[in-house]
Amino acid sequence: MQQLKSKKKWLPALIVAVFVGIIVILAIMFGFFQRQEVFDKYEVAYEIDGKLYEVFPISATDIGVDKKSKDKNLYFRVNSYYNIDYLFRLAYKQYEINEPSTNKYYSGLIDYSVADNAYVTQKDVYITNNESYATYDFFDKNGKKIYSYNPEETSNDDYIVRIKPTILQGYEKSDIGSYDDYLNITALFKDKLGMDVNVRIDEDKEMVIFSIK
């Protein structure tokens, strides 16, 4: 009889604990604890004098945006460093505008082929003969190194945030994996290039829209 009473005492606590655990898991899956989000299903546009331009191969999959309503920061997935290079070309106006895109919201397509500067370079660091990891160096238009990314030192890197894909961000459950490192482009360009990177979300057009000035 005493044992039955003991079970009755801890059973409600167990039910509450299980319920709380389920709530926490769902909150993580739906990204409630993250300060940034990724609009995987959206298009990306670069804004010049109020007009929007297509920026392929830059895609929304690699872009993170603050959830706060004002003064949003633009983040970019570090592993897609080859596309970060295009952000530098946009900043330095090293592009041409080609014929209108097939998307009605775009006034044209950005062509980066007018420049071949390497603003981001990769270097492999070998731990053993068969094991290595990649680091990335970032340069300004004068060839001066302005930043280095090392995945082993991100805990002390103020420009790096970790973002995990979530269901609410347009990902299917099967696509949700581990956290990825994203570089705070807004902060880096402001601190190192003296340029302002602005980003906003147009939910009606389903677009991530940014500009660099």
Image (tube, rainbow, N blue to C red):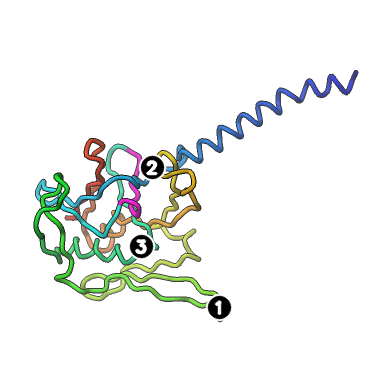
Mark nearer the viewer, 1 or 2: 2
Q: Which comes sooner in the sequence, label 1 or label 3?
A: 3
Disc 1 to disc 3, C-alpha distance: 23 Å
Looking at the picture, does residue 31 appear above or below residue 15?
A: below
Query: CB under 8 Å between callouts 3 and 2?
Result: no
Assign a secondary structure to mark 3: helix
Categorize mark 3 by other alpha carbons within 10 Å: few (<14), some (14-19), many (20+): some
Query: Which residue is under mark 3?
Result: 80
Q: Which mark is residue 130?
A: 1
> What residue lies at 14% left-to-right and 64% top-to-bottom?
95
Mark 3 or mark 2: whose residue is earlier in sequence: 3
Q: From the top left corner, tell me how far across and down residue 128 is, in percent.
A: 57, 79
Picture residue at 23% right of the left edge, 64% below the top: 88
Q: Is residue 104 left or right of residue 160?
A: left
Amino acid type shown at disc 2: Gly
Q: Which residues are magenta?
A: 60-68
Q: Amino acid at mark 1?
A: Asn
> Residue 152 versus residue 124: which sits nearer the camera?
124
Q: Nearer the viewer, mark 3 or mark 2?
A: 2
Q: Which x, y percent locates residue 129?
A: 56, 81
Number of residues whose C-alpha sits closer than 10 Å to that of mark 1, classed few (under 14), some (14–19) or many (20 or more): few
Q: Position of residue 2 (x, y in %)?
A: 89, 20
Q: Which mark is residue 22?
A: none
In the picture, residue 34 is in which quadrant? top left
Judge by depth and name the residue closer to the eye, 199 or 171. 171
171 left or right, relative to 42: right
Q: Which residue is mark 2?
A: 170
Question: Does 92 sit above or below residue 105?
Answer: below
Q: Give the residue type that dot 3 points to.
A: Ser
What is the CA distance from the residue labelled 3 to the residue labelled 2? Answer: 19 Å
Q: Residues within 10 Å of mark 2 (few under 14, many from 20)?
A: some
